[in-house]
Every structure is written in structure tokens, then in C-alpha cells.
Amino acid sequence: MGECGNDEFDIRELGTILGVWAHPDDEAYLSAGLMAMAVDVGSRVVCVTATRGELGSMDLERWPVATLADVRTRELAVSLELLGVSEHVWLDYPDGGCADVPADEAVDRLVTLIDDVEPDTFFTFGPDGMTGHDDHRTVSEWTSAAFARTAKPGARLFHATKTDTFDDRFATTSGHRRAFGDAGSPRTPEHETAIACRLTDAFVDVKVAALRAQVSQVDVLRAEMGHDLYREWVAHEWFCLAATR
């Protein structure tokens, strides 16, 4: 593994990919480029979303909580279609309530899915949950437990991260602070990441389109940051190797 575009990095090495995320848009922000690249070379990509994000309104007048689950369900379908990802699974747990779900139940469901898909590569949050969200942290725990129980030999589990350079670059922007709070994003030295992907312009275009499809989550941030800065903000994807089988 190496940098995207580096001769040492070949997206085909990831094999079949399973991404496990908490809310619609997590998958796009953290791995849309890698998913689109994998689909582009014919690899299988399966996406799991734990909740429909029904509490995550950025503007209650435009997107009231009562109808937000349906809105985000439709948005995610369009977003994944733009990435070329045709296999998606909802766990349908309550937004903000993943920590209250019996862990054995959630892990058992993931184990059943893993046995069916037989992924080579797993993408999910690190223990920090990227933004510290309890649902993100819980999904990370479930995925790690399911990976340990049933992943096939040679499989690898990757945790999404950000870097010192990234956080320093965007720390003063309002959109960045909205996403990560005053503490900023997770900071992993780039040389310690297993995947450090600066997307090509073509794949940044695909990623931005997939994100823009999730209007209820993206419009406010894009308006705050402006198109060019927002595009730069989402142009990198980093993952640390968390476990191997």
C-alpha cells in the first residue's frame, strides 16, 4: 500500500470491500473516492449503514426531523448510484441510539453479512469515531468484533483517519469546525497511514457529486466553505491499518 497514484498503490489490492458506517454521508465523506476507484476496476463494493440519520437535520425548516429519514434514504441511494455502488444494507438502528443496541445482536448481523460477502478489505471508523459521535464509536466496535470473529484469512481492517497537515490546513474554517468541533479532526502522521489517497481530479468530481446528492447534509457546509475550498477539503482519504487476519 502507498499513496494513491503511486506505483506502489493498486486499488485492485483491496479486493472486495465492505464499508460499515453509522449514517448516510459517512461513507461518502470518508471513502467515496476509494469506493469509486474500486468499482471502476471491477471490484465488488458493499456498503452498510447502521441508521438512516433521522436526527441529523442541518436546517429544521428545510429538513424537519419527521421526514428526514425518508429524505436521507433517497439521498443515499442517489449518492451510491453515482459512485457505482449497487450493494447496500441498512441495519435500521435508531440515529443516536447505536450504543443502546445489544452489541451481540449487531455483531451477529455483521458476521452473517461478512460470511456472505467474504470481504478482503474492511473500512470503518477508528475508535475515536472520527468526530467523536457515539454512533460512530459504536459502529467501530461492532465492526472490529465482527472482523475478529469471522473475517477470512488475509483480510484487513482499516480505520478512517485524518492527518496533522489536513487539520492544520482547515482548522480555521467554519465548515471544518462544524464537522470536527474545536478539538479538530483525528491527527495521524501521514507516514503512519496505510492508505494516503489524494484523489485525481476526476475522482474528486465523482466524490463531490456523490456528496452533493446528499443535499440535506452538504448544502450548509458547501455554502459556508465555498465550492473550491469544499472540494479541496474532501480531496484526500486516509486510513490506518487496524487489524489483519
Image: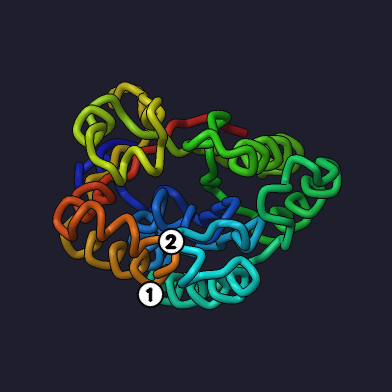
Residue drawn at 73 percent across, 55 percent down: 115
Q: Is residue 35 left or right of residue 10?
A: right
**In this view, 241 is above or below 147:** above
Q: Position of residue 46 (x, y in %)?
A: 56, 62
Identified by mark 1, the residue type is: Leu
Mark 1 burial class by Cα count in 10 Å: few <14, some 14-19, many 20+: some
Q: Is residue 86 left or right of residue 33?
A: right
**Seen from this angle, which residue lies furthest front?**
61
Question: In the image, which disc is placed on residue 172?
Answer: none
Question: In the image, which disc is placed on residue 82?
Answer: 1
- Does dot 1 land on a helix, a strand or a loop? helix
Which colouring convention does the figure follow?
rainbow
- Does dot 2 land on a helix, a strand or a loop? helix
Q: Position of residue 105 (x, y in %)?
A: 85, 48
Q: Is residue 145 left or right of residue 42?
A: right
Residue drawn at 14 percent across, 56 percent down: 228
Identified by mark 2, the residue type is: Gln
Q: The C terminus is located in which quarter? A: top right
Q: Is residue 58 left or right of residue 245?
A: left
Question: In the image, which disc is placed on residue 217?
Answer: 2
Residue drawn at 23 percent across, 53 percent down: 230
> Closer to the camera: disc 2 or disc 1?
2
**In this view, 102 is above or below 49:** above
Question: Is the Cβ of the residue at disc 2 closer than 8 Å to that at disc 1?
Answer: no
Residue 186 vs residue 149, the one in the foreground:
186
Residue drawn at 74 percent across, 40 percent down: 99
Q: Position of residue 243 (x, y in %)?
A: 57, 30
Distance between the Cα atoms at labels 2 and 1?
17 Å
Q: Position of residue 69 (x, y in %)?
A: 62, 69
